[in-house]
Amino acid sequence: MIAFEQFGAGPWGTLQLADLGAEVIKIEDPSSHGDVGRYVPPFAEGEDSLFFETFNRNKKSISLDLRREEARDVLEDLVRNADVVYSNLRGDQPRRLGLTYEQLKHVNERVVCCSLSGFGMTGPRAAEGGYDYTMQGLAGWMSLTGDPAGPPTKSGLSLVDLSGGYVSAIAVLAGVWRARRDGVGCDCDVSLFETALHELCYVGTWAASRGYVPPRRRNSAHPSIVPFQNFATADGWIVVACPKQKFWESLCSTLGRAELAAEERFADFAARDRNRDELLPILDAAFAARGSADWLARLAEAGVPSSPVNDVASALEDPQAQARGSIAETDHPALGRVRQVASPLRLGDEAPHERAPFRGEHTESVLGEVCGYSGERIDELAAAGVFGNRKEST
């Protein structure tokens, strides 16, 4: 896979494939000092950062300045031996840079050209850039998130970027499978905006079909299932979920309020939704009487879905995460020991983790191994400025 990518969404998409064993060759522009993710604070050392490590482990990097005429020949030699050309640029850029299937099929008829952009390669916004925060606002996410009395609020994580990366990885896998079946490649046109719209999921269906206006709920409550939300305890917060009637009945018994399950106003999903303003103060008062650990033990014994509201450090130390080996470790010359969350994709034997590449680290080795270039040919290209400074291409 040849990847023209930077920052978050695109590198996240190709990371999923790299973790599964794909060879991802990252093209970095020497004139702009490579992927901007290399310089994201707070944990950055020169051209390397923990942000960049998170998105680019198990990849290779080559420097290539596409403004140089000779660089196009290098690109086509790479494409000749590739399954995928991947980019996360503005929607108008793949065509301008010659990265579409129509522009590359003469080199490799089976190549899959995947573009992950803000708005896709067509439409009135194709030439606009797109970022996770702006997409969360544009696609309606912020209107759904936060306390009813507070302002519209973004998700705590860059979920549009991450989701867009996953969607693009699925598109690549489907495209490669089809190319191997039919012998013909294609374009994959994926956008962050449409990904964010798609993830409106059933709320989008309700709004499109019935004009539903989603309310914001206190304590991160589910829009229609009650109870399914955060509750304050005597010493913290827990999450309690009753997505089945049996959980509701068990919860009532655990709270010492078995009579609630028999009340008509709380009898089923629809009744509890209609009467949530009567029910939730009762539950709030009950949960406030004991500490979180006490409630979680009681709820677990009763089989009621529940969890603590962890901070990030506590989540990473959860016994389940430890038992499953969910933290990957690598050594980095500048950053030292790097611990990051491993891929959740488990296929066969676990693949080893390699640190993210230095900028241009694999230029010569990739061009020699993949394209068959001799040392003399690489020297000629370097002298023409195709790789930027020679020190960046080793």
Image (spheres, helix red, strand yellow):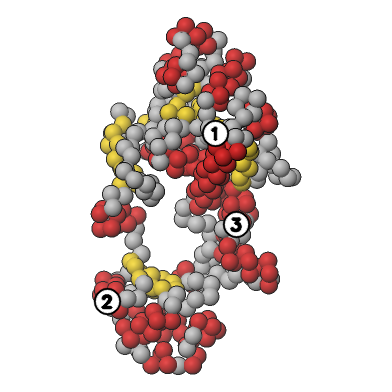
Tag 2 and tag 1, C-beta contact below 8 Å: no
Give the x, y percent position of residue 31: 54, 22
SS under mark 2: helix
Binning the other alpha carbons within 10 Å of mark 1 as few (below 14), some (14 to 19) or many (20 upward) gives many
Residue under numbered circle 2? 301
* The image quarter in which residue 321 lies: bottom left
* The image quarter in which residue 168 lies: top right
Give the x, y percent position of residue 125: 70, 44
Tag 1 and tag 3, C-beta contact below 8 Å: no
Q: Earlier in the sequence, mark 3 or mark 2?
A: 3
How far apart are the alpha carbons under marks 1 and 3? 25 Å
**Amino acid type at mark 3:** His
Give the x, y percent position of residue 325: 28, 49
Tag 3 and tag 2, C-beta contact below 8 Å: no
Residue under numbered circle 3? 198
Outermost residue toward the right? Answer: 124
Q: Residue 25: give its label.
A: none
Q: Earlier in the sequence, mark 1 or mark 3?
A: 1
Identify which residue is drawn at 39% across, 34% down: 58
Residue under numbered circle 1? 84
Indicate whether 310 appears above or below 43. below
- Viewer-proximal residue among 41 and 165: 165
Identify which residue is drawn at 41% across, 90% down: 260
**Amino acid type at mark 2:** Glu
Indicate whether 244 appears above or below 163. below
Indicate whether 8 appears above or below 376. below
**Amino acid type at mark 1:** Val
Q: Quadrant of the C terminus?
A: top left
Binning the other alpha carbons within 10 Å of mark 3 as few (below 14), some (14 to 19) or many (20 upward) gives few
Q: Earlier in the sequence, mark 2 or mark 1?
A: 1
How far apart are the alpha carbons under marks 3 and 2? 37 Å
